[in-house]
Image: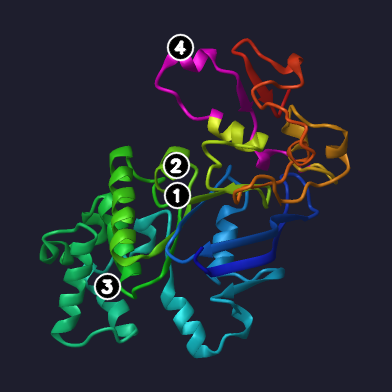
Amino acid sequence: MTAPILSARGLVQTFANRKAGEWRRHLVHAVDGVDIEVREGETLAIVGESGSGKSSLARLLLSLSKPVRGTISYRGQALDGLTKAEHRAYRAEVQAVFQNPAASLNPRMRVESILTHVIRRHRLAEGNGVRELIAGELHAVGLTPAGEFMQRFPHQLSGGQQQRVAIARAMIRKPRLIIADEPLSSLDISIQTQILDLMRELKRKTKVGFLLISHDLNAVRSIADRVVVMYRGRIVEAGKDVLTRPLHPYTRALLDARLIPDPKLARSRRRIILESDAASTSPPSGGCRFRDRCPFAIAVCETQDPELKRVCADESLVACHRVERRMGFELAQPVRPEALSRDRGVRIGSH
């Protein structure tokens, strides 16, 4: 097992939020006691609904915001204790690719100028070496002929080409980890496949790791070595087989929300259907924060918040009382038959 390049313990991030029609502000726990490790050279995916805390966690790991509580460590050293030189090394080795590539590229600069700025800012090359380095990075991300793309402005590129430029900019500093926050969401499905193929190729050639934040479970399943599932600021499940052998009801509900190309199979399967998103309702106080949407909740779920624990011989972790107590419940057999609808789905949320 490789050592973690980036790890966090007990991360907490809160924001003040004011609901419509109210003057009083409420404290929202975007990240609530998260422990996570990103290992050298792996692709770790973080999935969950909008508002589950994925992007807030990414910003903390990128040191773009400071946590209220908890520590983030880079190669075993806390970020707060790094020297200036060590922090520069951290910035070089942990790069970011954002959701909207057009917004992350200066619209008034040509591609060559965008990448030249990074090279000169960090003294990566001089003279003719600058243009050679740019051409090499553009070729590595599939933008050929490089000379033609150098002269284009961002608006003259497609969404996929813009994302390739953003990846090239991140790769210029030879990072060991790229944190990609929803890099596929603004792209067509065919372009998404190309970007995923590019990420695989870069990982194979350079051994760079990825922390991929995405809501597309099919994309995650095709590329991730491990998957972390977040719900209302907490990790509820993590492991290598999360998408093939889900243990938490929330994970199963996310998987059941995917479209199935076979209509007969889609009509016949029993599903857990999330009718409302977590952000639209206030989290229940005390106990499991998923219990108000869970058809498998039991008495202990009302009073005790389940801890993330290892429940299998492998590295699988899950935060669920039903699994922890080894009651052997089957997710396809809900304990509330009255919740079954005409399409044989278990509807969770607003009833």
Residue 259 located within the stretch drawn in magenta: yes
Q: Is residue 120 above or below residue 260?
A: below
Q: What is the C-alpha distance between the residues marked 3 and 4?
A: 51 Å
Mark 4 burial class by Cα count in 10 Å: few <14, some 14-19, many 20+: few
1 or 4: tag closer to the N-terminus: 1
3 or 4: tag closer to the N-terminus: 3
Q: Is residue 218 above or below residue 39?
A: above
Q: Nearer the viewer, mark 3 or mark 4?
A: 4
Asked if the residue under mark 2 is in contact with the one under mark 1, i.e. CB atoms within 8 Å, the reply is yes
Q: Quadrant of the C terminus?
A: top right
Give the residue number, with chain letter if any, for mark 1.
Answer: 224
Task: Report the side of 146 relative to 59 (left or right).
Answer: left
Three-letter amino acid code of the residue under disc 4: Lys
Q: Residue at x 81, y 47 (%)?
A: 305
- In the displayed orientation, state which residue is furthest to the front: 313
Q: x, y (%) of residue 274?
A: 63, 30
Secondary structure at badge 1 equals loop
Q: Residue at x 28, y 80 (%)?
A: 119
Give the residue number, with chain letter if any, for mark 4.
Answer: 264
Front in this rendered view, residue 230 or 110: 230
